[in-house]
Amino acid sequence: MRKKILIGIMVMLIVFVAGACENKSTDNAAPVISGVEAVFIDRETDTLDLFDGVVAIDEEDSGVQTDVTENVTVTLPPQATRDGNKVKFNQCGDYEIKYSVKDNAGNEKIVNRPVKVRNIYNMYCVNATLPVLYCALDMVTNNYKSILTFTRKDTINMEALDSKRFIYAENGAEDINLSFAKGMAVGIAKEDEHSYFRLFLNDAFNQIEIFTFIQHNIPQERYEVKLVSDGSWTYNTAFPYREENAYNVWEANSRIYNGVMEKAKAGEFNREDNGRFNINFEGTVVGSHYYSDAQLSQMAIMAAQRPNTELWCAYPETLDSADSRVQAEIDKAHMPKMEPDVMYEALSNEQKNEFLKIVNFDKDEFDKNYFDKDGDYLIVTGTNPFSGSFTDEEFADILNRIGNEYSDYNILYKPHPSAVTPPSDFVKVNEWLTENNVKILPGRLPMEVISWVYSDVAMGGFDSSLFMSVPQGNTKFFIAESADSLSVLTKQLYNDGVFGTPEFYWKTAAND
């Protein structure tokens, strides 16, 4: 009997223990660490925040998740110095930071985070207003040593630039300045194996890369190219691929671009009598000098298919083709949506102030001299010449109709940089400006900057690339015959509803 009782007790114990084991949760999986992607930083100016974006999650076999980020520890290489969570490296090289974390069950996860430390240089070689603004927006987001050659004179305040950071800077640059800048970059690249360059170019003049880095055998892993939009050129002349039968044009341009690049990589450069170089591919001659060569202007998208190159523009989605074969090629290109007004808004207040100094914009002065009244403002934008193709009577009539329609607004006039004041023989136009107390804004100051700083101001005027970077909804009218008369991109944006429902002002029957 006693034996049967013992056996019964043992069976009950076994069942109890088994049940207890069945109900007990287990944890055999190590936590998962995220946010430790590879990092590329400048030795002199960049610091790495060790835990910015880093998350560690432990998931038990039962499905219960626990945040164990606070348990994460790091092991640094000896070249790194730590100040709180910030890390800086004192010499260039390729390193790894070890992140490790354990859960309560003792499961450990280790992840090595690659860190590339380089001496990073910016190289800005652009002209035209919009490319200059793209570069100025980039300048204030980093403190890398920089080489600057702008041909857009007066757009940049050279005195606002740090002379220690800008190791070479020339505004109103000519061929000799570009040659010097290229030589400086090549010299740095050859002397310092850890140098890395960010090259900013107009998308219309991407040949400068060829005669700077490719000609001197600097591998593309050591630099990146930002082809920045040249405004309306990007969407019109430089983009002949919209139609259904565009593949023949694409194929022909692709053949030229690839042919030029292959010759460059093979070192097949021709030296001219004046000391410049060129590449001749089946009659297409691409030269090394500044902005007089634009043979590759229709090939920015082909360049952006390369891993180290991007095409920056505000509306990359409009660079599309009805030809499916061309569209398949466009889809391979690196074209991030880079809207200058959005880039400006993303800056910190300190960075905005620095940007405005660089582009010669004194907001206090503008508040005092132009935006000194209560109420809404409307800026009418001009063209070159001041009145376009209109006579004095025709343009005065248009301005008068605009003034009547927007009588509740304070009206300002922003002339084209090349047409700062109305001609003296435009008597009626000058009378209208005077009688309506319309002040004329400085012609050379980029209108884009005004529209970003005064982001609620209404706009209207002659069709131009300006309206591609004006905050959406601010465009009230165009001085144009109809939507069909707008440039290719402006018309496309109009059809897409980007401008809302702007009006059109043109010659009346009495003035025809």
Image (tube, rainbow, N blue to C red):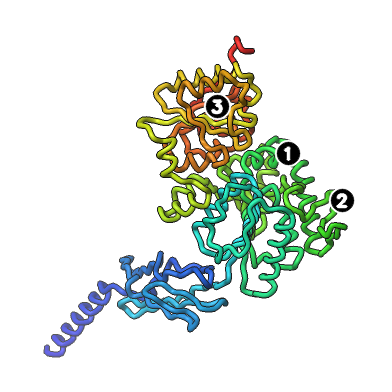
Residue under numbered circle 1 = 246
Task: Determine if residue 490 is in view.
Answer: no
Closer to viewer: mark 1 or mark 2: 2
Residue at 74% of width from left, 63% of height from top? 214
- Identify the image quadrant of residue 184: bottom right
What separation in Å lies between label 2 and label 3 (alpha carbons)?
44 Å
Residue at 62% of width from left, 74% of height from top? 194
Residue at 64% of width from left, 29% of height from top? 385
Element marked by disc 3: strand
The circle on residue 282 is 2
Residue at 61% of width from left, 35% of height from top? 489
What residue type is disc 3 on?
A: Phe
Give whichever of discs 1 and 2 has the lower sequence position.
1
The circle on residue 478 is 3
What separation in Å lies between label 1 and label 2 (alpha carbons)?
22 Å
Residue lying furthest front in this view?
424
Give whichever of discs 3 and 1 has the lower sequence position.
1
